[in-house]
Image (cartoon, rainbow, N blue to C red):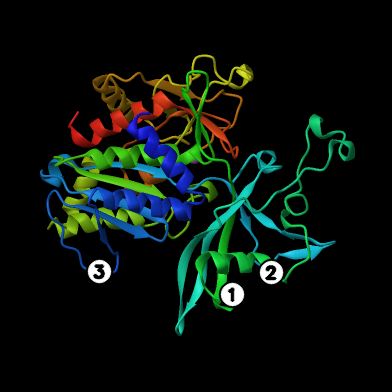
């Protein structure tokens, strides 16, 4: 198996929530000698130096280029690390008729039916007492601990004609079916972390599909997993910047949480995080505010988020002229109303990269009678004034708990992004 695919499956399996995804990203950056910088500290930056900054779960990695920023601008790759999910309401645990269950809130827009009748894990983070204060620890129970069962067909005869799950009443996750102490979930979390139950002050927990990422297809050309949107593009950008050595341009990988809920949070793409970091790099390297604004004008951003692959069972959902196929190469995404930030200039830039990397390139435009999704590209483009191209790899069943992508597409995307960061094309 290609080394990128081995590492991709490892990242998928290690990232049940964006909290763990964030730790997995940091682990990989540190493996490639990126050093942690804190937003609250004073910075000294060396040319050729590799650094990363975290704002809660979002991460920005930087490699300082050898040339003047006024000549090169920043080369930025950006993606979101979160996926639609079911978030546990911490105080909602109840035992009725010996069945212990917990309620959820819907995070983002999952295909809800894909979460039913599956072995589910629980992961996230908890606040634990530490002397007079608390500290936050990531947690993953690392075994299937919950299920949201369907009603039997015999009790819901119409289910195959389409059924709407009520988010309050039908999505209770069953944790166990025998009488026990008052809060077995807190007990399991305390055991997992080796802390006293009374020392757990609070939690932020999500359900996740316990099934592992795996290759699929007679020719093993597909990858099936949860959270491919958007760990696919997260891993592509991360792998590409990790391979870069002594670049001329300053390279940035901006990996944001909270895209699935609109990006308007402290660490989302619609926060001050990226613009603060870009300005601080310029200030630290001795550039004036005017020069910083000129540097932005010279910069470029590739926004990576997955694209809808042509689905042979639903041909009526695609514009026949713009139906990207699985393993047919990276997709440039366009939208007349700029839900995607791609413009004529930025698309030419990405096409040239694909051509130089000898990778095929596809185009996606949604049918004119359907509503278009969106991503972080247009937010970053309008906030920073940087030209953006929105790209992504073809994917089936976006927002299902189990999505599908192509093996070759993933390898090709990394090849193109490596070239983007390393060379001045
Ligand atoms: Co996405």
Q: Indicate which disc residue 197 carries.
A: 1
Q: Position of residue 94 (x, y in %)?
A: 76, 65
Q: Is residue 375 visible?
A: no
Q: Total number of numbered labels?
A: 3
Q: Are marks 1 and 3 in contact (CB under 8 Å)?
A: no
Q: Indicate which disc residue 41 carries.
A: 3
Q: Indicate which disc residue 131 carries.
A: none
In depth, the one of 110 and 339 nearer the eye is: 110
Query: On screen, 384 above or below 204?
Result: above
Real-space Cα separation, disc 1 to disc 2, in angstroms: 10 Å
Real-space Cα separation, disc 1 to disc 3, in angstroms: 35 Å
Callout 3: CB less than 8 Å from ligand 1: no
Callout 1: CB less than 8 Å from ligand 1: no
For label 2, the crowd category at 10 Å Cα-Cα, with few meaning under 14, some 14 to 19 and many 20 or more, is some
Q: Are marks 1 and 2 in contact (CB under 8 Å)?
A: yes
Q: Is residue 195 visible?
A: yes
In depth, the one of 309 and 92 nearer the eye is: 92
Per the image, the residue denoted by label 2 is: 183
- Upstream in the sequence, badge 1 or badge 2? 2
For label 1, the crowd category at 10 Å Cα-Cα, with few meaning under 14, some 14 to 19 and many 20 or more, is some
Give the quadrant of residue 317: top right
Q: Position of residue 111 (x, y in %)?
A: 64, 39
In depth, the one of 404 and 63 nearer the eye is: 404
Left or right for 93, reference 241: right
- Upstream in the sequence, badge 1 or badge 3? 3
Left or right for 412, reference 232: left
């Amino acid at each position: 198996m290609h080394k990128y695919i081995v590492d991709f499956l490892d990242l998928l399996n290690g990232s049940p929530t964006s909290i763990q995804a964030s730790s997995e990203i940091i682990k990989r950056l540190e493996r490639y000698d990126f050093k942690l910088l804190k937003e609250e500290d004073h910075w000294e930056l060396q040319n050729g130096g590799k650094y990363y900054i975290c704002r809660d779960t979002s991460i920005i990695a930087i490699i300082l280029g050898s040339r003047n920023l006024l000549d090169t601008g920043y080369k930025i790759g950006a993606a979101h690390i979160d996926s639609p999910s079911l978030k546990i309401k911490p105080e909602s645990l109840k035992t009725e008729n010996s069945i212990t269950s917990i309620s959820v809130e819907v995070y983002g827009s999952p295909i809800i039916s894909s979460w039913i009748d599956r072995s589910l894990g629980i992961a996230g983070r908890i606040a634990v007492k530490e002397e007079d204060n608390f500290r936050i620890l990531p947690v993953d129970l690392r075994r299937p601990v919950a299920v949201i069962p369907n009603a039997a067909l015999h009790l819901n005869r119409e289910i195959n004609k389409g059924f709407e799950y009520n988010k309050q009443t039908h999505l209770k996750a069953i944790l166990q079916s025998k009488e026990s102490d008052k809060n077995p979930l807190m007990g399991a979390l305390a055991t997992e972390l080796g802390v006293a139950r009374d020392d757990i002050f609070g939690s932020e927990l999500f359900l996740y599909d316990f099934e592992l990422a795996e290759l699929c297809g007679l020719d093993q050309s597909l990858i099936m997993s949860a959270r491919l949107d958007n760990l696919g593009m997260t891993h592509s950008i991360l792998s590409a910047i990790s391979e870069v050595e002594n670049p001329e341009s300053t390279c940035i990988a901006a990996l944001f949480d909270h895209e699935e809920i609109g990006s308007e949070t402290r660490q989302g793409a619609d926060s001050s995080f990226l613009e603060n970091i870009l300005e601080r790099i310029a200030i630290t390297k001795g550039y004036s505010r005017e020069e910083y604004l000129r540097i932005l004008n010279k910069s470029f951003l590739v926004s990576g988020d997955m694209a809808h692959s042509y689905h042979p069972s639903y041909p009526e959902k695609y514009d026949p002229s713009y139906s990207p196929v699985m393993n047919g190469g990276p997709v440039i995404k366009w939208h007349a109303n700029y839900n995607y930030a791609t413009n004529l200039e930025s698309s030419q830039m990405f096409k040239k990269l694909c051509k130089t990397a000898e990778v095929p390139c596809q185009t996606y435009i949604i049918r004119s009678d359907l509503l278009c999704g969106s991503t972080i590209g247009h937010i970053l483009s309008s906030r920073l004034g940087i030209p953006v191209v929105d790209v992504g790899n073809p994917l089936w069943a976006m927002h299902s708990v189990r999505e599908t992508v192509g093996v070759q597409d993933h390898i090709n995307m990394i090849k193109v992004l490596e070239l983007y960061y390393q060379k001045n094309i």
